[in-house]
Amino acid sequence: MAKVKPFRGLRPPVDLVEKVESRPYDVLDSEEARTEAGNNEKSLYHIIKPEINFPKGTSEYDPRVYTSAAEQLKKFREQRWLVQDSQEDYYLYAQTMNGKTQYGLVVGACVEDYLSGVIKKHELTRKDKEDDRMKHVRITNANMEPVFLAYPDNSVLNDLIIRYAATRPVYDFIAPIDGFRHQFWVISDQSDIQTITEEFAKIPSLYIADGHHRTAAAARVGQEKAQNDPNHTGKEEYNYFMAVCFQASQLTILDYNRVVKDLNGMTSEIFLKALSEDFIVEKMGPEEYKPSKLHEFSIYLDSNWYKLEARPGTYDDHDPIGVLDVDISSRLILDKLMGIKDLRTDKRIDFVGGLRGLKELRRRVDSGEMRWALALYPVSMGQIMNIADSGKIMPPKATWFEPKLRSGLIVHLLS
C-alpha cells in the first residue's frame, strides 16, 4: 500500500510565482532555457538549468554547474523568492488544457515504495541521466521538480479535490509558451491531511506517468542519505520525494510519433510493397490522416498520407507489450524494414510529441530533413498500468503526457 506524507513546501510568494515558474528541465535545451530566462534573475532555470549561469557552450555536466544550482537555491531563499511553509501540508495542483482540467495531489512519496515496487515504473532509465539528476538532488538537497504519478480513481480523494477546487486558489495563471492554465491550493486542514494519508494507504500501487529519471535519482539519494546517517529512523525527510499524483482517468496521453531519415536503400514503391506483407495499406492522399483506433497507423511519404492497418496475427492482444502499437511498428517497420534496432541510440530516427501534431511530421519531411514519418495511435493509461503491474517495460518513446507539470510552484527540501 502507498505511503505518503505532507511536507513543508518551499514556494514563491503569490506576486512572484509567474517570475519564478518555468517549464521542466528536460523539455528544452540549454539555449532555449537561456532565452526564456532572459534577464529574469528570479527564473527557476537558474537552478534547474544552471548552465545558463555560465558562458554559452558550458557543459551542463560541468561540476561548476551543479555547484551553481546549490548557490542559486540559497540565493532564492535569502532573497525570499522561495519561502518555506510553516507547517507540513499537502497541496492541490490543477492544469487546464483545451478546456479539460486535471487535478493532482502534491505529496511526499516514499522512497521505500519505489524500491519495493509499490510505485511502479513502465520505462527503463539511462544511467547517465539518472546520475545527472542524482548529482543535482544531492547538491541542492532538494527535489526541485516533482515526479508525475497516477493512481486508480478514488471517490473519497475525488470528493476532497472537488471541494478544494471550488475555493479560490493560491496561484492561478496562464503559462507562456503552452498557454495552459495552472492553479494551486494549499491543503492545511488537519482532518483533510489525515484523510489523504489514510486513503493513499488503501491504494495498492502508484504508477510513474512521467519522470522516471527524477524518481530513480531521488530514490538513490534517499538510500545514500539513509546509509550515511547513523541515526536513521526512516522518518527523515530524505526518505520521501515530491510527486504530483493524478487520478488515472483524468490523464491525457498523446501520440508519440516518429520521423526517419531514409528508406534503408529502398524506393518508395518497394517500401510500400514491403509494408503490405504485415499491413493493409491504403493511400489517403495529401490531406493529413490521423490514426483513429488501436492497430491503425499512418505514414507520410512523398507528399501523401497512407493508412496502415496491422494484419491479424501480427500482434498479440493478450500480451501487455504485444498489444502495443509502438511494439508492432518497432518490430514490423522500424526493425524489419529499416534496420533500426535501438530506438534510443539510432541517429536515423527522431521522435515528435503529439502536441506538435501531424503538421510537424509533414514539415520535417517536406523540408528534406527526414524522408518519411510514422504516426501512432496513443497508448492508454490502462495499458501503462497493465504493463507496470505485469513487471514488464514499455518500448522506448511510447508515451507523451500533456500538459507538462510546471516547475517552481513548489520545492521539497530533503532536510
Image: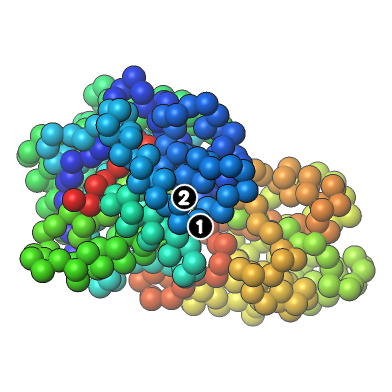
Classify the position of the N terminus by image quarter: bottom left
**Residue 314 point in image, percent of width and height:** 65, 78
**Residue 369 point in image, percent of width and height:** 82, 53
- The residue lying at 23 percent from left, 39 percent from top is 9
Tell me whether circle 2 and circle 1 mark residues in contact (CB < 8 Å). yes
**Viewer-proximal residue among 403 and 322:** 403
Looking at the image, residue 180 sits to the left or right of residue 336; the answer is left
Q: Is residue 119 visible?
A: no
Q: Amino acid at mark 2?
A: Val
**Viewer-proximal residue among 205 and 260:** 260
- The residue lying at 36 percent from left, 23 percent from top is 16
Q: Which mark is residue 65?
A: 2
- The residue lying at 69 percent from left, 59 percent from top is 350
Q: Amino acid at mark 1?
A: Tyr
Asked which secondary structure carries label 1, the reply is loop
Looking at the image, residue 216 sits to the left or right of residue 239; the answer is right
Quick one: label 1, few (<14), some, or many (20+) residues within 10 Å? Answer: some
**Residue 272 point in image, percent of width and height:** 85, 68
Marks 2 and 1, Cα distance to the nearest angstrom?
7 Å
Q: Which residue is mark 1?
A: 61
